[in-house]
Amino acid sequence: MELDKKLIGHTFKPFTTTVEAGKIRLFCKAIGEEDAIYSDESAAKAAGYRGITAPLTFLRALQADDPNKGGLLRLLKVDIGLILHGEQHFEYFAPVVVGDKVTCQEKVVDIYDKKGGALWFVVQEMEMKDQTGKLVAKGKGVTVVRNPDAAKK
Amino acid sequence: MTTIPKFDQVKVGDELKPLVLPPVSRHQLALYCGGSGDHNPIHVDLDFAKKFGFKDVFAHGMLSMAFLGRLVTSYAPNDKVRKLGTRFTSITWVGDVITVSGKVTGKREENGEKLIDLEVKCTNQNGQDTLQGNATVAAA
């Protein structure tokens, strides 16, 4: 298995998703987050937020709303069972709250291998803008692809 | 409600109050699969995980990163967090007991804002780091 380095620079089709209270509630249940700013609008407003607020890493759940989800793996022709998450970084410029319409734009910025091709790394950057066009967050993720051929050697 | 850290009172080396979590369960992974939109079966379907060479299902890296987020937002309010990043350094298995800890590594001013840099990490019951991360928060 070898990943196509010509895909460096590939830009994915942007998509827009609406931040929903129910999704944040389930996300918080899963991670054990109980702060009321993530579930109660009046508590969130009392704390100075515009509305029920997205937890820091909920941004990744917004990314998962991509109607063309799995695009990276299709592009790379990689089975989902072979990937691991290597790194994730977020920069925050403004909180995202329920009702916001967030537009996500992702691109591939690097592809490289280590250990003689046993592991491949795909670096993606993401920008998120709100309904006013303001940049609210940037993300950078590293996906690790385990080369199934490496084990056979 | 989390209060804003006071820049003058914060010292490099200060430790954040750690978060000791209940053991990671299959139920939690199912909830996170639905809640995060990350439907990779490797985290919830044992047959699938075994087919790809794993002994069991394992936690989403982003579930543990959410724990880092919980720690950071217990130290500074959500809207004061400027950066959160991590490397996923080892796999978190079902049953692992994760402790989330952090400490202040720096204080600085940038663009007129007082910033505090944190080192944050997740560690399992064997003392092995599973996530090694960093965060930056704004102070008052």
Image (cartoon, rainbow, N blue to C red):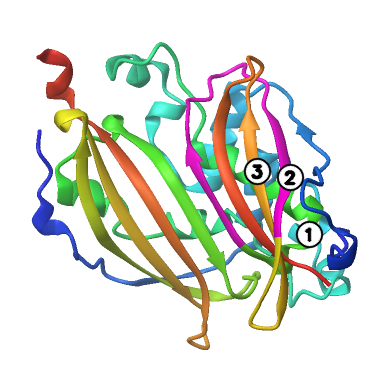
Pointer 2 residue? B103
**Other residues around mark 2 within 10 Å, as few (<14) / some (14–19) / many (≥20):** many
Residue A13 screen position, x and y as percent:
26, 70
Residue B11 screen position, x and y as percent:
83, 54
Q: Mark 3 — on which chain does it sit?
A: B
Residue A81: name its quadrant: top left
Determine if marks 3 and 2 fall on one subunit.
yes
Q: Is mark 1 on a helix, strand or loop?
A: loop
Q: Which residue is at 38% across, 36% downward?
A: B40
The reply to whether residue A53 is visible in this rendering is yes
Pointer 1 residue? B76
Q: Which residue is at 80% across, 44% downward?
A: B16
Q: Which amino acid does label 1 sit on?
A: Ala
Mark 3 vs 1: CB contact within 8 A: no
Residue B105 inside the magenta-drawn segment:
yes
The boundaries of the magenta stretch are B83-106
Is A132 positioned to the left or the right of B48 in the image? right
Q: Mark 1 — on which chain does it sit?
A: B
Residue B110 screen position, x and y as percent:
64, 76
Q: Mark 2 — on which chain does it sit?
A: B
Using the image, determine if residue A102 lies above or below residue B34: below
| Of pointers 3 and 2, the one earlier in the residue sequence | 2
Pointer 3 residue? B120
Q: Which residue is at 88% across, 62% downward?
A: B3
Using the image, determine if residue A103 lies above or below residue A65: below
Q: Which of marks 2 and 1 is in front?
A: 2
Q: Which residue is at 64% across, 82% downward?
A: B111
